[in-house]
Amino acid sequence: MPIYEYRCRACGHSFEDLAPAGREHRPKCPQCKGREVERVLSVFSGGPRKKAAAPAAGCKPGGGFS
C-alpha cells in the first residue's frame, strides 16, 4: 500500500496515511478527526531538502583550483 501525505483544511495538521491501491481513500485527521483533508505533494526522499554544500577551500566553482 502506498503512503500519502495529507493536510487537514480545518486545523492545518499534516500527516501521512497508508492508502489502499486503486480505491478512493479519505482519511480522518488524527488531530481534529475532521474529514476535510487534501493530499499534498511529497518530497521524494521523505525529508526536507538540504542546501548545497559550500565549495571546499581552494576549489573554484566548475572544478579546478585557485
Image (cartoon, rainbow, N blue to C red):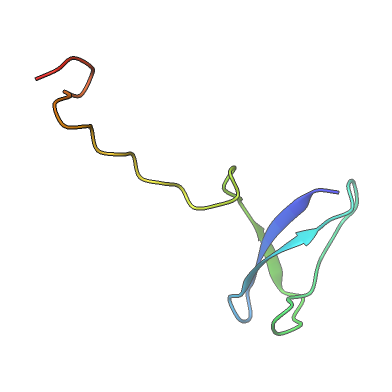
17 or 52, which lies in front?
52
Residue 9: x %, y % from top left? 63, 74
Q: Residue at x 73, y 76 (%)?
A: 29
63 or 9, which lies in front?
63
Residue 31: x %, y % from top left? 69, 82
- Image quadrant where residue 39 sits: bottom right
Most distant residue in the bottom direction: 32
Most distant residue in the left direction: 66
Q: Is residue 6 above or below residue 30?
A: above
5 or 55, which lies in front?
55
- Image quadrant where residue 19 sits: bottom right
Q: Residue at x 58, y 76 (%)?
A: 12
Q: Residue at x 35, y 45 (%)?
A: 51
Q: Residue at x 16, y 23 (%)?
A: 60
Q: Is residue 56 above or below residue 60?
A: below
- Image quadrant where residue 18 sits: bottom right
Q: Is residue 30 left or right of residue 66?
A: right
Q: Is residue 29 above or below residue 49?
A: below
Looking at the rendered structure, the number of numbered marks drawn on it comes to 0
Residue 35: x %, y % from top left? 77, 76
Most distant residue in the top direction: 64
Q: Is residue 29 left or right of residue 46?
A: right
Q: Is residue 33 left or right of residue 44?
A: right
2 or 36, which lies in front?
2
Q: Quadrant of the C terminus?
A: top left
Q: Is residue 62 above or below residue 52?
A: above
